[in-house]
Amino acid sequence: MRILRRCAALAALGAVLLATAGCAAPAASASVTVLCSNDAAICSAWAEDFAQETGIAVTMDRLPTSEALERIRRGEGLPEYDVWHGGGSEMYVAAAQEGLLAPYLPPRTEGIPAQVRDPRGRWTGVYVSFLGLCVDAGRLDEVGAEVPRSWEDLLDPALAGWVSASSPRTSGTAYTTMLVQRDRLGEEEGLGYLAQLYPQIPQFTRSGTAPVQVVAEGEAAVGISFAPYCDAAAAAGAPVTTILPRDGTGYEVGAVAVLADAPHPAAARRYVDRAVSEEGQRSGAASGIHQVPTQPGLPGSFDEVRGQLGVPVLTSPLEERAGRRDALLNWFAAEVPA
């Protein structure tokens, strides 16, 4: 069975298999396979905490959000995963519309804001991350650029070749960046801005978390990513600072869902129960990356934080955001060299 494969190879793939007895193969009823679209450290923290609490072995594979959606689509009819955890909910909306997610209303969802969960229970938002700029001021001095305080500042000619960002082909972070420009400027002007921004980026990363590492290693001066990843790099000693653009930012609602035809549905539902709970939403913080929880009883929850950012928060209905994806990705494929 797939759930019992690759005990030794998981570390190399950015995955983790956790059981109460090392790598011993658990019974099928005590296993769950999770596709994780978040930072590797957070994925590991989620898996470890769930396994320790329940005794259920977790096989976890990590893929950026857009890639994860394509992987789930390809697996239809031959289910590979039980749960999808992490990554922007626009992709979950698309998956739900295609019948790839199983309706399930986990306990303790009542207080979670309605705008960050599916009314039919096909996915539930479990964290929020605001989009920001991860900046190395020392590197900016070296290249002769000012610290960018807005999206427009990223068009400074001095920053050409010194901006790092992920590819919309693979990354939900990159898609959020596209949506922010559309919400900020409108359809035509938003695309016009992106057409000026993308030439500033010498190479697109596959993952939305990777630009932070590129900046931390001195290979870029500015990275576009979600703020918690830059904050964590700074806390670990990297010479970086998080800036929320004064002309507005957007956010990702990271979700969790049981996949349709999950091979281990009972374990999948139990995993989702914990991911939605206060305990589950706290567990990711063990990685040192502090995302905004959606449970209102937790400190720094979404309802508490969003009014305290000091910059405009740009958003639009999730169904609209999901519906724009094909057109925006087609534009990117046509206008931006591979």
Image (cartoon, grey):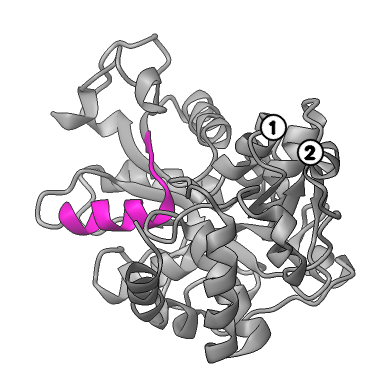
From this view, report whether residue 49 is shown above or below residue 338.
Answer: above
Q: Residue furthest left?
A: 77
Query: What's the residue at 80%, 49% (across, down)?
Result: 242
Numbered range of the magenta stretch: 61-75
Tell me the residue that label 1 is attached to. 218
| Residue 323 x/y as whole percent | 39, 82
Q: Are marks 1 and 2 in contact (CB under 8 Å)?
A: yes
Tell me the residue that label 2 is attached to. 139
Q: Main secondary structure of the magenta part?
A: helix
Quadrant hosting residue 153: bottom right
Q: Secondary structure at mark 1?
A: loop
The quarter of the picture where the N terminus appears is top left
Q: Is residue 309 visible?
A: yes
The three-letter code of the residue at mark 2 reads Arg
Between residue 13 and residue 54, name the one nearer to us: 13
Query: What's the residue at 30%, 76% (across, down)?
Result: 97
Q: Look at the image and say whether residue 66 sits in the magenta stretch.
A: yes
Going from N to C along the chain, the mark reached first, 1 or 2, is 2
| Residue 297 x/y as whole percent | 77, 57
The quarter of the picture where the C terminus appears is bottom left
